[in-house]
Image: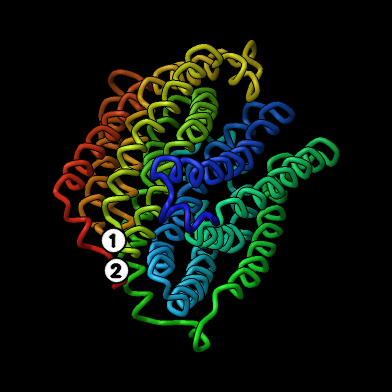
Amino acid sequence: MNKKQKLLTGVPGRSLFFFAMPMILGNLFQQFYNMADSVIVGRYVGEDALAAVGASYSFTNVFIMIAIGGGIGASVLTSQYLGAQKHQEMKTSIYTFLITFFVLSTLLAVFGLYGNPRILSALGTPANIYEDAVRYLQLYFLGLPFMFMYNVLAANFNALGKSGIPLALLIFSSVLNIFLDLLLVIRFDMGVEGVAIATVIAQGSSAMFAFTILIFLLRGYPTCERPRLFDSSILLHGTAIAIPSIVQQSIVSIGMLLTQSSVNQFGSSALAGYTAGMRLESIAIVPMIGTGNAMSTFTAQNLGANQPERVQQGYRSSYGIIAGFAIFLFLICQFFYRPILSAFMDTDASVIAYATGAAYLRFIGWFFCLIGFKATTDGVLRGSGDVMVYMAANLINLGLRVSVARICSPIWGIQMIWYAVPLGWCVNYLISFFRYRTGHWQKKALVS
């Protein structure tokens, strides 16, 4: 029995878990892929280089989350068409959004290339790391279309029930990225420019492999007529889901970007510690976000097959999955934060940076269950196409995080920046949960 059939007919909780695991592992490799830049420049170049990559990360991660959110949102239609056995429309949907996101990513790359110096200045990036941050971003944006294409392709693999393919591709690209990081930074002494070049090469390679595999895979879905390459009505329907999905996926990253100026006022050492802490937070929330994304595909396929009761069963089971991950992550944050942070910095030489990272990580470890419950609830709403309330919930989440950080951190200290995070998660979850309880999402299937 293939994974698509298991999502429609297997035990809901078991099907959800085993479908989610390759997605979670794939997202972990993507985070390791991104984190390798920080670890290598932090250990082999210095604290300022780590801070420069960290200042860039808040900016680049917004674009990464736009790509992931857009791909997931657009692939909801792919999942619902697959569940309804409408293979021709499914292929047209995939082609339509590949073309759309290629054009969008090219425009964003141009914006990033020319706009990043002004944005870094507006965020108050410390002068001693400004030039390195600009150089890193200029090289990074050259590869932005590759990153977008890979994430949209990965979302479509997941929508087809083939979550193992993105995992294999990410393992390949992560290993390649780390190898190139070490080669260019240590052997050729290229600093932050070296890690940016390594990222572009690794992303480009994985995108090309992913595109080739998808074209081959789609041949296994027969159609009566040749599918169209572009359909404006599909684009319109998919965009209505993709935009809230982009908002939902980008909340953490946009929050990091908008609070960057609040962090910068505490100096480059605090920024280095905050960088380490938020990188580790980004890894820790991967199982939660991955389970939520799996819940989205699970919901879309089962609503396409007219099985809303299986969605309810899967959603209830997701709470047990999230609780298990949350307990494990809590223990890691409380008892192993020292060796984890030491991978990023010399803890003896960087007292302020280490103290900042440790305080961030130990606090946030108590609250990972909240983002997990939020992610799976949002996953049901997104997978059904019931997107407006959960988009509003995520915007409220963002507003709380940014306003508390900006208003309170100058008064009570840098810790207010991460104190605001679980507050936003909790409010977001409660709003989405009340929407789920109304049952309106069961009537929102986009494919009939």
The residue lying at 73 percent from left, 40 percent from top is: 178
Q: Earlier in the sequence, mark 2 or mark 1?
A: 1
Residue 435: horizontal and vertical position, in percent? 18, 47
Please give the residue where the numbered disc 2 appears in the rendered image.
446
Q: CA distance from mark 2 to mark 1?
A: 7 Å
Name the amino acid, label 1: Gly
Q: Is residue 179 left or right of residue 217?
A: right
In what element is the residue under mark 2? loop
Q: How many marks?
A: 2
Looking at the rendered image, the quarter that the N terminus falls into is bottom right
Compared with 128, 143 (above or below) is below
Compared with 137, 100 (above or below) is below
Compared with 134, 306 (above or below) is below
The residue lying at 52 percent from left, 71 percent from top is: 98
Residue 197: horizontal and vertical position, in percent? 71, 51
Looking at the rendered image, the quarter that the C terminus falls into is bottom left
Residue 93: horizontal and vertical position, in percent? 44, 74
Dot 2 and dot 1 residues touching (CB under 8 Å): yes
Which residue is outermost to the bottom? 225
Q: Nearer the viewer, residue 286 or 23?
A: 23
Q: How is the image coloured?
A: rainbow
* Crowdedness near tag 2: few (<14), some (14–19) or many (≥20) residues, C-alpha within 10 Å: some
In what element is the residue under mark 1? loop
The residue lying at 46 percent from left, 40 percent from top is: 17
Please give the residue where the numbered disc 1 appears in the rendered image.
385
The residue lying at 67 percent from left, 54 percent from top is: 200
Q: Nearer the viewer, residue 15 or 377?
A: 15
